[in-house]
Amino acid sequence: MAWTKAEPVPGTVAILGSGEAAATGRRVLGMLLRELAEPRTLAVLDTPAGFQPNADRVAGKLVEFIAGRLGDLRPRAGVVRARREDLGAPMGEAALAAIAAARCVVAGPGSPSYMIRQLADTPFVAALRAAHRRGATLYFASAAAVAMGTYAIPVYEIFKVGEEPRWIPGLDVLAPLATPLAIVPHWNNSEGGAELDTSRCFLGQARFDAMRRQLPHETLVLGIDEHTACVLDFGRGHAAVLGAGGVELLRGERTVRYASGETFPLELLASLDAAGAPPDAPAPAAKPSTAGMARDVGVHGPDEMASVETALVPDPWTEPGAQSPAIPAELVDALVAIRMELRAARHFAAADHLRDALLAAGITIQDTPEGPHWEVAGRH
């Protein structure tokens, strides 16, 4: 998938299954910000959670995460309110200007259907598409990831209200891919435990399989595990999988899975069909070239972890003269994400063992509502 020199290259897109303000998010967003020219302006849309009384705080916490965990990159992040009712008013004009000026647009948890109702067929989504086509980076997770596809799951209505499983038209933000797309985050969710299948964005496997039959045959389903990112790099023509899990591509009878650390060509998103990948498509074994980032670790069971390849790079969040952690920061991030996956799968003994091992290495973990935070013992 190539662009001519006369056309601007669309911006890089990071789609996260979850963990936008946790260890995976920190690594991925840091990687994206390093590739942006200064000033690194970020527009954090509050729209997905706009129905909540504390919508400004939901988006505000993302701004605080960006400023606090990525402050060395001097990001300029601000909350942007985008509502249909604000069109033509100063608030709406300010939102349009912020989206147009942003080098990166960020959106996260909330309700996909609410976000779609507020943005569909408005100047807001037109501005978002235009910004991306001009080169703006997109960093979308969870509900916002669902909403950006051609078809979207009304998660709350199905999972909480009990409405009939169905798809609704999405915002179709990724038009440059030239393929109808359905994005399904929380692909491997296991919060329901043994009693309730909450995988496939809380739908469960059986209900999701039935919903897939409702989609037009040419639609590509992009399933993204929790604490995992699928990074679409239009300039380099490939997608990279980063984080604790993997990504699945489904179209017709064909399913291909890519693990963390693997890449695949963007052409595959448009050409994967019932007959499989194109004959000349490379095998899913290439590692992404992401300077300053560690290879991520996958969980294979409650008591075993995959081997780790990591680049020994300095922790950019370490103050000059401060004691460095015993292991690289990127590896700590990966291990903290694995601990979360183990806890979600109810492998509490293994999760505690990993926590104790980190503690022995001088790393303390604090679980917070925004996700776990870690620090080197004795550093304040």
Image: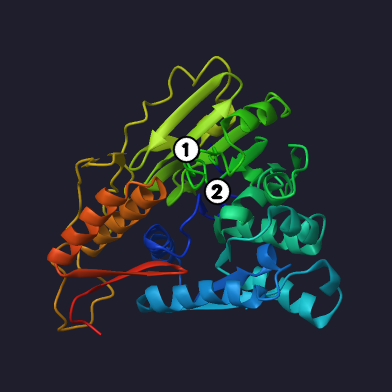
Label 2, on which residue?
5
Residue 261: quadrant of the picture: top left
Residue 130: quadrant of the picture: bottom right
Mark 1 neighbour density, 10 Å: few (under 14) some (14–19) many (20 or more): few
**Identity, as a three-letter code, of the amino acid under mark 1:** Ala
In this rendering, position of residue 233 left or right of residue 136: left
Tag of residue 211: none
Tag of residue 194: 1
Q: At 52% from the left edge and 38% from the top edge, which residue is drawn?
A: 195
SS at badge 1: loop
**Vertical position of residue 149 compared to residue 366: above or below:** above
Colouring scheme, one of rainbow, by chain, secondary structure, one colour: rainbow
Cα gap from disc 2 to disc 1, whole angstroms: 53 Å
**Vertical position of residue 288 compared to residue 29: above or below:** above
Instruction: Tell me the quarter of the image containing the C terminus.
Output: bottom left
Can you see residue 264? yes
Q: Position of residue 175 (x, y in %)?
A: 67, 44
Mark 2 neighbour density, 10 Å: few (under 14) some (14–19) many (20 or more): few
Q: At 63% from the left edge and 72% from the top edge, which residue is drawn?
A: 101
Q: Position of residue 319 (x, y in %)?
A: 23, 82
SS at badge 2: loop
For this orientation, the residue located farthest to the front is: 195
Numbered label tally: 2
Q: Position of residue 172 (x, y in %)?
A: 70, 47
Q: Position of residue 207 (x, y in %)?
A: 65, 32
